[in-house]
Amino acid sequence: MQALSYPLTISLHALAAVIWVGGMFFAYMALRPVAAQLLEPPIRLELWSQTLAKFFPWVWLAVIALPASGYWIIFAVYGGFAGVGWSIHLMHTLGIIMILLFLHVYFAPFKRLRRAVDEENFQEGARNLAIIRKMVGINLLLGLLTVVVAVGLHRLAV
């Protein structure tokens, strides 16, 4: 069973990252421009409110799975942070920043967006959706950078 621990853990880690970063990429690069072009603000705000409500439980799973699997790998495979290279430290830092940004989005502008949509306060909803859009854009860039570090630059650090 020990021989399966690392492959299962790194697979869980990669799947969690793919779901989170891939979801942000789809939302930002495909859904956002089409929704802005085709939908009136009240419908667009409802679309985003409901879409994010469906996506965020998956992000919560990623926010739990990524640190849990990452720390397991760092301590069980490398013996702790002293045994890893700069690329792991960079991925760790980027991951913490991404999680903090998500927590802010979830507990602040997303909650306000949901309330504004429920109250049909479309101006407030649009203001909070704009904040979410900017923060998702930042998190998407950080996520893509993390993938580059994990797949390409990590090999240089070994």
Image (cartoon, rainbow, N blue to C red):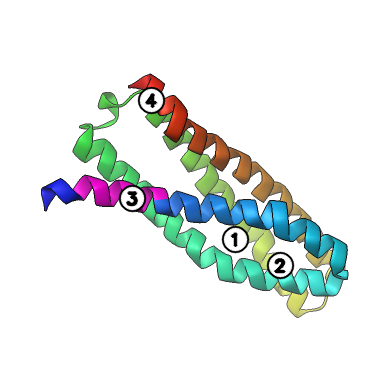
- The C terminus appears in which quarter of the rendering? top left
Pointer 2: what residue? Answer: 48
Name the image quarter holding residue 123: bottom right
- Asked if residue 53 is positioned above or below residue 31 in the image, the reply reads below
Q: CA distance from mark 2 to mark 1?
A: 16 Å
Q: Residue at x 49, y 56 (%)?
A: 19
Question: Would you say residue 7 sits in the magenta stretch?
Answer: yes
Q: CA distance from mark 4 to mark 2?
A: 38 Å
Pointer 1: what residue? Answer: 107
* Residue 100 as seen in the image, left or right of residue 13: right
* Residue 77 as seen in the image, left or right of residue 51: left
- In primary-sequence order, the first of circles 2 and 3 is 3
The amino acid sitting under disc 3 is Ser
Identify the element where label 2 is drawn: helix
Name the image quarter holding residue 78: top left
The label nearer to you, 1 versus 4, is: 4
Q: Residue at x 61, y 45 (%)?
A: 140
- In primary-sequence order, the first of circles 2 and 1 is 2
Q: CA distance from mark 1 to mark 4?
A: 37 Å
Residue 64 in sight here: yes
Q: Residue at x 82, y 78 (%)?
A: 120
The amino acid sitting under disc 1 is Phe
Question: Would you say residue 54 sits in the magenta stretch?
Answer: no
Q: Which mark is residue 11?
A: 3
- Asked if residue 20 is positioned above or below residue 77 in the image, the reply reads below
- In primary-sequence order, the first of circles 3 and 4 is 3
